[in-house]
Amino acid sequence: MSHRLQVIADELYRHQTAAAELPKLTLRYEGLTVDDAYEIQRLTMQKYMDEGARLVGWKMGLTSKAKQQSVGVDEPIFGHLLSTMELEHPVLSVRGLIHPRVEPEIAFVFRSRLAGPDVTVRDVWLATECVVPALEVIDSRYENFSFTLIDVIADNASSARFYLGDQAFSPYAFRLDEVGVVMRLNGNVVQTGAGAAVLGHPVKSVLEQVRMLTRYGAAIEPGMVVLTGGITEAIHVHPGDRVQIAFAGMGSLELNVT
Ligand code: OOG
Ligand code: MG
């Protein structure tokens, strides 16, 4: 393990836990590769796990055109989901966050393991216990929420918090690509989209997740959750805001920001 990557991981951990912005790594460190960035991410997450956080799943990011265009990075990425990021109730305190944004997602929960380069869509369905409407709170640690591919991977794909709706659904209940989503902020419609925005169908995002994990020697383990990626652009939130996300056929989530 390179000393340089550990130094960078320590720096990111300090900024994540202090909710302090930092300048892009790529402005300050020469020659970082995508593999280096995933190693920095892994080393950073290991620090939380050494402190008692549990790995509860994975998240895909930048799986929709809306998301890719809003941040200017045009390929999917993944990050770790830790137990400490999960909101038990749909209330978001901005304390400990820098410039949080909320986005609608469809989550998969798994009953069996998925690993290896040859996983198919059928394998994903067989391993899926249920699907759940979800929201993710992202909070880039970089100034102005501005980063390159390498920076955002190292920063655990901007992960901050996530919330899963109470009601789970059978993956066979309806077409996930045709699930329409309407996001309101304080009563006003601010974003609309459909499941198809996520790589054509959210199941494709899970497939991509398994393939990317396989490259780094990891897997989807039984009981894990996967967030398949923002369906629309993420919206900035501030204390006092109320976010409502209606998922057609899957009910609504309501998040209060304090
Ligand atoms: C990167 C994280 C993207 C998603 O669902 O697309 C993400 C970012 O936009 O800061 O979580
Ligand atoms: Mg997301």
Image (tube, rainbow, N blue to C red):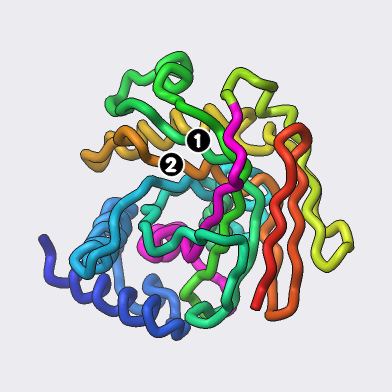
Q: In this view, does 60 lie to the left or right of 118?
A: right
Mark 2: few/some/many CA within 10 Å (<14, 14-19, 20+): many
In the picture shown, does residue 140 fall above or below 130?
Answer: below
- Determine which quarter of the picture holds residue 240: bottom right
Does the magenta segment cover residue 167?
yes
Q: Where is residue 141 in the image (x, y as percent from the top left)?
A: 47, 75
Name the residue that disc number 1 marks: 108
Name the element at disc 2.
strand
Q: Residue at x 28, y 34 (%)?
A: 214
Q: Where is residue 235 in the image (x, y as percent from the top left)?
A: 70, 64
Q: In this view, does 134 lie to the left or right of 122?
A: right
In the picture shown, does residue 8 fall above or below 168?
Answer: below
Name the residue that disc number 2 marks: 225
Looking at the image, the residue that sits furthest to the right is 188
Name the element at disc 1.
strand
Q: In this view, does 257 lie to the left or right of 33?
A: right
Q: Which residue is drawn at 24% across and 62% down?
A: 49
Q: In this view, does 86 lie to the left or right of 82?
A: right
Query: Which span of residues is magenta-colored?
Result: 144-169
In the rendered view of the protein, which quadrant contains the N terminus? bottom left
As drawn, the label of residue 43 is: none
From mark 1 to mark 2, how far is it between C-alphas? 6 Å
Mark 1: few/some/many CA within 10 Å (<14, 14-19, 20+): many
Report the front residue among 224 and 165: 165
In the rendered view of the protein, which quadrant contains the C terminus? bottom right
Q: Position of residue 168 (x, y in %)?
A: 58, 35
Q: Position of residue 63 (x, y in %)?
A: 57, 43
In the picture shown, does residue 10 fall above or below 188?
Answer: below
- The response on whether ligand 2 sits within 8 Å of label 2 is no
